[in-house]
Amino acid sequence: QVQLVESGGGLVQAGGSLRLSCAASGTTFTFNAMGWYRQPPGKQRELVAAITFGGVINYADSVKGRFTISRDNAKRTVWLQMNSLKPEDTAVYYCKANLYREEYWGQGTQVTVSS
């Protein structure tokens, strides 16, 4: 059974940085894509950044230039480096991984940015 475990969330002041990690277990296959989504309070879940097995990256416009996604295929781990954080980045951040037609989600980690 595939499990994704996120870590690295927390409370930070505006302008600060956080680094989220997501480690997968329960499979020996390499995920086609891994990524990060977030759900702000009272809003729908949205894509933050995603990276394919081959390294193709997609960012939401709102985080371009501030966030960096990276992954280690062998370790089945994806990271999200978040710099210059803003209060509007406050959300629960979820890790997602795609393996062929299946998709898996982590339990989420809270990121709160104070002004």
Image (tube, rainbow, N blue to C red):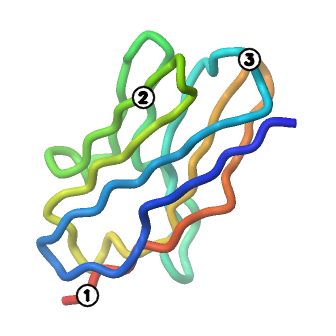
Which amino acid lies under the numbered mark 3 shown in the image of this protein?
Answer: Thr
Closer-to-camera residue (4/50)? 4
* Frontmost residue, 53 versus 26: 26
Which residue has dot 3 on it?
Answer: 28
Give the spatial CA distance, label 2 vs label 1: 28 Å
Q: Name the N-terminal-most of marks 3 and 2.
A: 3
- Kindly check if marks 2 and 1 are in contact, taking CB atoms under 8 A apart as contact: no
Residue found 79% across the figure and 36% down from its top: 2
Counting from the top left corner in percent of width and height, residue 80 is at 36, 46
**Position above or below: 62 against 114:** above
Q: Which amino acid is tagged 2?
A: Arg
Q: CA distance from mark 3 to mark 2?
A: 16 Å
Q: Nearer the viewer, mark 3 or mark 1?
A: 3
Place of residue 56 in the rendered image (x, y in percent of width and height, measured from the top left): 37, 18
Q: Mark 2 or mark 1, which has the lower sequence index?
A: 2
Q: In the rendered view, does 25 fall on the left or right side of 48?
A: right
